[in-house]
Image (spheres, helix red, strand yellow):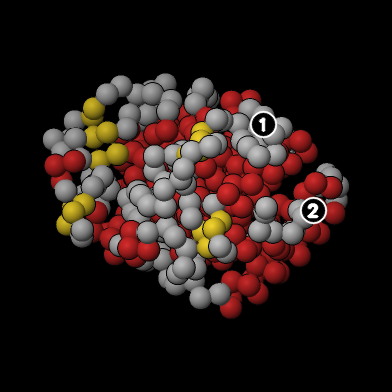
Amino acid sequence: MCVHHARPWRMLSHCSGRRRAREAVRASLRCRMKISSIPAAPFRHLQRLTDNVGVLERAHGIVPRYERGYRVDDVAHGLVVVCREPSPSDELITLGRRYLYFLARAQAADGKFRNRLGDDRRWRGTPEAQDAWGRSLWALGTAAARGPTPGIRAEARALFDASAQIGSPYLHSMAFAALGAAEMLERWPGDHGALSLLATAGTVIGEPSADATWPWPAPRLSYANASIAEAVIVTGEKLGNGDLLRNGLRMLDWLLASETRNGHLSVVPDEGWSRGDDRPAFDQHPGQVAALADACMRAAAVTGDNSWLTGVEMTTTPGSRCSTRRLAAAAMPSAAPVAAATRARSRRWR
């Protein structure tokens, strides 16, 4: 049973009323976020984990583990967080430039990305169009549209264009790339590379099952699940495809209901979950919570349905069963801080 009232997305149509709906939800978001007790985004841990190269992959408590090296996935997350900050400090802007330079070095001539850099400053593996590619496009699209300096915005757009010319056969990779494409289209509505990525994402992610008990395009939930739903939502919106938009909203509605227990959030754990499995309530990742906050904010903005904001509020509720200890310790580099995600989205849709 879904925790929300019946969704108006079932009656959603592509008409001029959507613009009016957006204006209404923007006003609502301003009011709701002003009274919300969302704290300022915590950057201390991110700063600890960043050296003169990039974001270190691991830490033991607050102590960086230099021997584990760096991952593009984490650096891309860092760039998204910095570019979403409404008024970044000079120190954060410096971090943003460092992250962008790291991604530029990770990008191959064909637009693919390496993922791992060792502590010896040597790249591991070969460039691929997998999650590192997708997350990089997400970060580059965000930086191109919302970077804190003209230089960051220009460089990020050039790097985005170089990688948008290819696609990926992987569901998560295309979902991340679609989020970056959506950022580009907010600033440049006719961008060919971004539109092409969204079209590919819609095809790769595919149709969710018609089964109401599992309306998902894959037999198993794993990581960044809400990002997949958000990617379908934004693809449907930007391409004017009502079926895709409704599919994405249906997926997110089901996911939020499935991850709600006794009125509190309990996200899918790292090991994943399939229909019929017993789902443990531990080893949950803060990245799942940040993705859910983003997706619910997107759904509220696209539909004008303020009930989606309940999902956002649940991600910041202390009672949510997503390892409060891990969230308090700051999710970076594994995921963008939830507070940063929600505050940045409220700014985005004003």
Indicate left or right for 11 with 58 as reference: right
Amino acid type assigned to the residue bearing label 1 in the image: Ser
Q: Residue at x 58, y 78 (%)?
A: 35
Indicate left or right for 2 with 338 as reference: right
The answer to whether 310 is drawn above or below residue 166 in the figure is: below
Question: Which element carries disc 2, helix, strand or loop?
Answer: helix
The answer to whether 141 is drawn above or below residue 34 in the figure is: above
Please tell me how many numbered marks the rendered image carries: 2
Question: Whole-percent x and y of residue 20?
Answer: 81, 59
Indicate left or right for 192 with 56 as reference: right
**Nearer the observer, disc 2 or disc 1?**
1
The crowd level at tag 1 (other Cα within 10 Å; few <14, some 14-19, many 20+) is some
Amino acid type assigned to the residue bearing label 2 in the image: Pro
- Measure the alpha-carbon separation of dots 2 and 1: 20 Å
Looking at the image, is mark 2 or mark 1 earlier in the sequence? 2
Quarter of the image containing the C terminus?
bottom right
Q: Quadrant of residue 89?
A: bottom left
Residue 98 badge: none
Q: Nearer the viewer, residue 273 or 79?
A: 273
Question: Whole-percent x and y of residue 4?
Answer: 69, 59
Residue 209 badge: 1
Q: Residue at x 59, y 25 (%)?
A: 204
Question: Which element carries disc 1, helix, strand or loop?
Answer: loop
Question: Whole-percent x and y of residue 283?
Answer: 35, 49
Question: Whole-percent x and y of residue 68?
Answer: 18, 41
Q: Note whether residue 201 is visible.
A: no
The crowd level at tag 2 (other Cα within 10 Å; few <14, some 14-19, many 20+) is few
Q: Residue at x 78, y 38 (%)?
A: 242
Q: Nearer the viewer, residue 196 or 211?
A: 211
Question: Which residue is disc 2 drawn over?
Answer: 8
Q: Note whether residue 307 is visible.
A: yes
Marks 2 and 1 close (CB-CB < 8 Å): no
